[in-house]
Amino acid sequence: MLGICAVARIRTMATNATARRLRDAVRHLVVAHGALEETRRPCGTELSIPHAYALLEFLRHEQMTVSELATMLAIDRTNVSRLCARMVEAGELARAPHPEDGRARSLRLTARGKKLARAVDEQSAGHFDRLAKQLGGSVGEVVAALDQLARAMALTKEDE
């Protein structure tokens, strides 16, 4: 007969094994997506993933502050501020006074930024279209599972 400590160790081992399976699956997803590789980008450009994602967010939201973009990308404000400064310098973003908050600066895509954002959107959509074709009829299930994973990750961040 197993003692209480032995049962607890077995449960911990099972929990750790499940946690490691999930971690490895997420790690393999990140690697397969090319997120760690500097030269292979699903968006079809040389842009970093945060840069490409920022462009896509600006396509969805006409204008934002650095803080709003940082929240959407789940990246600290300092790094997003540096990214936005590079994008302004490259002529992709324009800064203007915020319409409601005199202390904040509003950012929006320039004509150059819109062109680049649309190119990223088209390349990325093409990449995911090819991926969806590989998945066939299970795309909905995969998207639902990824949504569930994203919600769980967000809740886990709040707990830390």
Image: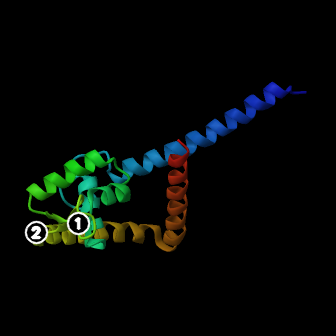
- At 50% from the left edge and 47% from the top edge, which residue is drawn? 157
Residue 132: x percent and y percent?
A: 41, 70
Would you place residue 31 above or below residue 130 in this image? above
Which amino acid, mark 1?
Answer: His
User: What secondary structure is marked by label 2?
Assistant: helix
Name the quadrant containing residue 121.
Answer: bottom left
- The label on residue 142 is none
Front label number (1 vs 2): 1
The residue to which callout 1 is attached is 98
Which is nearer the N-term, disc 1 or disc 2? 1
Residue nearest the observer in this picture, 84 or 48: 84
Left-right relation of 60 to 141: left
Residue 95: x percent and y percent?
A: 15, 63
The residue to which callout 2 is attached is 112
User: What secondary structure is marked by label 1?
Assistant: loop
Which amino acid, mark 2?
Answer: Arg
Q: Can you see residue 39?
A: no
Q: Residue furthest right?
A: 1
Mark 1 neighbour density, 10 Å: few (under 14) some (14–19) many (20 or more): some
Name the quadrant containing residue 19.
Answer: top right
- At 30% from the left edge and 72% from the top edge, which residue is drawn? 60
Left-right relation of 50 to 72: left
- At 33% from the left edge and 47% from the top edge, which residue is drawn? 76
Residue 86: x percent and y percent?
A: 14, 52
Mark 2 neighbour density, 10 Å: few (under 14) some (14–19) many (20 or more): few
Would you place residue 126 above or below residue 68 in this image? below
